[in-house]
Image (cartoon, grey):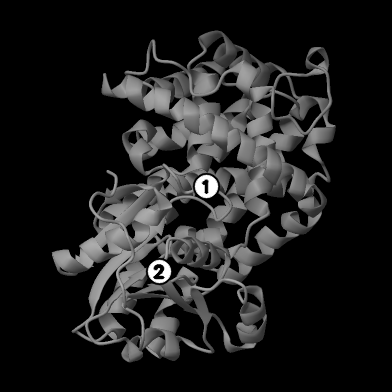
Amino acid sequence: MSANGDVTPLEGIAVGIIGMGDMGKMYARRIAAAGWRVNACDRPDKYESLKAEFAEIENIHIYANGHLVSRQSDFIVYSVEAELIDSVVAQYGPSTKLGAVVGGQTSCKAPEISAFEKHLPQDVDIVSCHSLHGPNVDPRGQPLVLIQHRASDASFTLVSRILSCFESKFVCLTAEEHDRITADTQAVTHAAFLSMGSAWTANHQFPWEETRWSGGIENVKINVTLRIYSNKWHVYAGLAILNPAAQRQIRQYAESVTELFKLILQGDREEFTSRIKSAGDFVFKGQEGKELLLRDEVLEQFSLSGVPRAERKPNSHLSLLAMVDCWHKCGIVPYDHMICSTPLFRLWLGAVEYLFRQPELLDDCIRFALDDDSFRSDDLEFTFAARGWSDAVSFKDFNSYRMRFEKPQTYFAPRFPEAIKLGNEMIKKILSKTKVLEAGRKQ
């Protein structure tokens, strides 16, 4: 739903932001541009650089620490990593202004809400939020979750009024609903792209330079993988490791990849085909006759490769086949959460349905996976990667997650600027397609 009512700034009301990473800065700039006073801080060692960065923006006031922000702000947003939320709230929460409203911008709400309940004064209201997109995506029309956890209607109205400047679509959920839905729409999506990056790095491949990784839905795989690795590792680690539903789904994705790859090695055509078709029937039931989210004329616009279409080779698409198998095993119908989905999830769903909702293309993929060994070594590395990411998440090992993330990040870094530019263009295109899809589903 969209925000309603008066959205002009209220005199004397200040918004505090604790944590000036990429999303914190985006929030600060947008809210200040709408006319609200913004009090902001990050770690003490960043104080001087932040003061210099925001010196020319009249409504943004940089402070040395969260105590100074908390004691004079009426709505305070903690924009820090989920792994650190408890310690940061424990430090600054007791300084919260009497009667203020506090929220967080983490991707996993269970530890965030726990920290608020544990460390905030009882006279403080809690209204949390989560913008379901990255800092470089235009927030207009994107989902923005609002969680009225412990708050009056007046406090909730204030937060809605402040955040209306984003022109996002408000989605009202509980903390538990938020974590379940974000697991359904983000956790496995991220795991798939992270595994691709790890596999390409292990094989010393720049996939856009290979004819077999060119064109069509390969453009989605490559561009989104590079887009994810161009971000900070903790953006994905908190969601995966601290969300129990995400842990289960990532583990199932690794199992789906492994089991399907074993069937390929065994040449078990009947079981392989049956499993894939059954999963597709479950996930895409009711989508017959509806327009595909992605089509060739869209996909071909966003290539990092100059390989002619005629020279391209088919692909086993193990990552896509395993995704639908995982959704089937977890009982997830991805279309159920389109209102609360990220741009990356919509791109991924578009790539998956492009394969599964074109029977001839899916049959060719199955035949290629079983009869051609061109991708066996790639699929082997992908299987290793998926299991490795699952282990890091299951063991709740943030350090292992970070090391796994930063190796491909370093490897692919030279292509990030171009990939981000293409990724932004892809997202704009897919969003227009999503509106058509959603309209069709409502009919």
344 relative to 366, above or below? below
Q: Which residue is mark 1?
A: 138
Q: Residue 303 in the image: state x and y as whole percent.
A: 74, 30
Name the secondary structure under disc 1. Answer: loop
Q: Is residue 212 visible?
A: yes
Q: Is residue 262 visible?
A: no
Q: Residue 119 in the image: state x and y as whole percent.
A: 30, 85
441 relative to 85, above or below? above
- Looking at the image, which is closer to me, 153 or 45? 153
Rate crowding at label 2 as few (under 14), some (14 to 19) or many (20 or more) other CA atoms within 10 Å: many
Q: Residue 424 in the image: state x and y as whole percent.
A: 62, 41
Left or right of 417 in this view: 68: left
- Looking at the image, which is closer to me, 177 or 423? 423
Tag nearer the camera, 1 or 2: 2
Left or right of 102 in this view: 27: right
Q: Residue 294 in the image: state x and y as whole percent.
A: 54, 23
Dot 2 amino acid type: Trp
Q: Which residue is mark 2?
A: 36
> Between marks 1 and 2, how big is the CA–CA gap?
20 Å
Dot 1 amino acid type: Asp
Instruction: Name the quadrant containing residue 213.
Output: top right
Q: Residue at x 79, y 34 (%)?
A: 208
Q: If the image is split into quadrants, where does the C terminus sit?
A: top left
Q: Residue at x 82, y 51 (%)?
A: 414
